[in-house]
Amino acid sequence: MNSKRGQVTIFIIIAIVLVVGVVGVVILRDKIFEEEIPVNMQPVYTAFLSCLEDYTLVGIDVLESQAGYIELPDFEPGSAYMPFGSQLNFLGNSIPYWYYVSGNNIQEEQVPSKKNMEEQLADFIEERIRGCIFDSYYEQGFEITQGEPEMDVDINEENVEVDLDMSFNIGFEEDSANVNSHSIEVNSKLGSLYNSAREIYEYEQNTLFLEDYAIDVLRLYAPVDGVEVTCSPKTWNADKVFDRLQEAIEANTLALKTKGGDYSLRKKENKYFIVDVDVNARFLNSKNWPNSFEVVPAEGSVLISEPVGNQPGLGVLGFCYVPYHFVYNIKYPILVQVQEGDEIFQFPVAIVIQGNKPRKALDVSAVEIGVPELCKYKNTFVNVNVYDTKLNPVDADVSYDCLGVTCDIGNAKSGSLREKFPQCVNGYIMVEAKGFENAKYVHSITETGSVDIILDKFYELDIELNKGGTALISFVSEASSKTIVYPEQKSVELSEGQYEISVYIYKNSTLRLAETTHEQCVEVPQSGVGGLFGLTKNECFEVTMPAQIVSNALAGGGKENYYILESELESSDVIEIKAGSLPTPKTIEELQTNYILFEDMDLEVGFK
């Protein structure tokens, strides 16, 4: 029995050895039977490996220049509300945003993983490797055949490893050689650059340092809030404010540096511009990239803040002051470039300032921020036709407003749009077109239907005013309000409609308001036991008003209600306005009297 058991054991061992041997041969058959490449064929194989390296380097370059993507994600366009879209066009190259806000106000992230980059690079090489050019060797009589490629890529800190399984057969006269496995190692900082880019991105998402810089620029280069001692209105041209902001954002973004870059605090760089990350990076912005600048309150392109203290009944103040507070919504992109040696990895992010405050940091990907529920349920087709007053079709953006919720619908190409709307009773179809007055049309959407909307065209006319000095000229209608500062601005865009035209003329003044002191009393709780029972007492203190020179005072103007016909706008180049004069005030009471007299002053309006 023991002898039989021993024989069985020997057979089992032999069987195991045979199985292992067969499996080993199957696995290593390519290596075992692979022919050594003859010397006269080695240049062909060297050319093949060089071609493999070239395609790898091209793929790496595409990954680095396109934020870790070779095959770009589906493009998502922006909207009038959010101008970004899902990709930034940089020198003709589309780069996917790592963070952006979609046209329907959803925060989105599209940061590729390293695994995804490896897969895209492998696919890129697989699609091209059989396209290597061997024409010079074909002319010498070589025969070259290639099988189906199967690629594996590993992206490391200092290099990229490429393993290719593909039959590569070389024949020349009586000789032949076949190689099935090919491996190369390409020197590249792709892995290290990607990790550095992720470090900066995560620092931005956690701290919103780019938004903080944007808030600082806003408060330094634009009127946000404050008080100035003056008796005439303060005005700012919104377009000029936005131009100044764009230039400041571009310059200040370029000034940002990182602790890990070529810039050191020992070089006495301004610490304010040093970003606390240990990588070498720079930040770019261009005013030519998609952006959005909005400010309220505004009258057309003019920001106006009216003075307090020159109104009737406020002479007791003894001085005037202008308080102002403007709220901005700003959106623009920043391109982050991380560099090591000659290699640069870049990705863009969207910067969003809403109501003078930065957007909230993301905790997770694709977080929805205030997406109107109504806009998710567009289920009723409506035809919208948009025309001018001569019934010519007009390209226009269409949205729908229901109970204060506005949904983007689409663009009326050649004046026509058929699209799904959310159902709503007594909602508003809103239409915007360049060169035309915005239109708002009441329309209940309960079933499929059609609506025609006519837009009033804007006409630009010059303004001539008969009086000298600085003037605020306003054209206020139900549809819009336009204000210009004359003579700095001498033209205005108007459409047909009923307007209240007002002109306030201000001239240099030497009115001096002396320093005044008066007593002011208030009731305060009594101290001790009396205060417990709600007893109060008068407490008085002196209020000192500083001396003030009124450099500009109301010196003329008037108001007029006028219906402007499109025929007048179309056939004229100039609006002629004649205004009356007021006496130069010598006291604040006389200044307030001018405001009373102003209310009864008329204008003469004509076209030529």
Image (cartoon, rainbow, N blue to C red):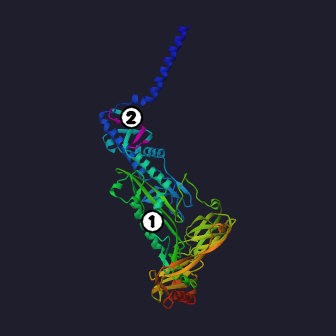
The relative height of residue 168 versus residue 300 in the rendered view (above or below) is above
Front residue (pair 461, 366): 366
Q: Which mark is residue 292?
A: none
- The residue type indicated by label 1 comes to Val
Residue 575 appears in the picture as rendered? no
Q: Is residue 232 left or right of residue 271?
A: right
Front residue (pair 175, 507): 507
Q: Which residue is mark 2?
A: 179
Element type at mark 2:
strand
Whether the residues at callouts 2 and 1 have beta carbons within 8 Å, the answer is no
**Magenta-drawn stretch, dominant element (helix, strand or loop):** strand
Q: Is residue 55 left or right of residue 553?
A: left
Q: Position of residue 179 (x, y in %)?
A: 38, 34
Element type at mark 1:
helix
The N terminus sits in image quarter: top right
The relative height of residue 212 versus residue 312 in the rendered view (above or below) is above
Q: Which residues are magenta?
A: 154-174
- The residue type indicated by label 2 comes to Val
Circle 2 Cα neighbour tier, 10 Å, few/some/many (<14 / 14–19 / ≥20): many
In the rendered image, residue 149 lying in the magenta stretch gets the answer no
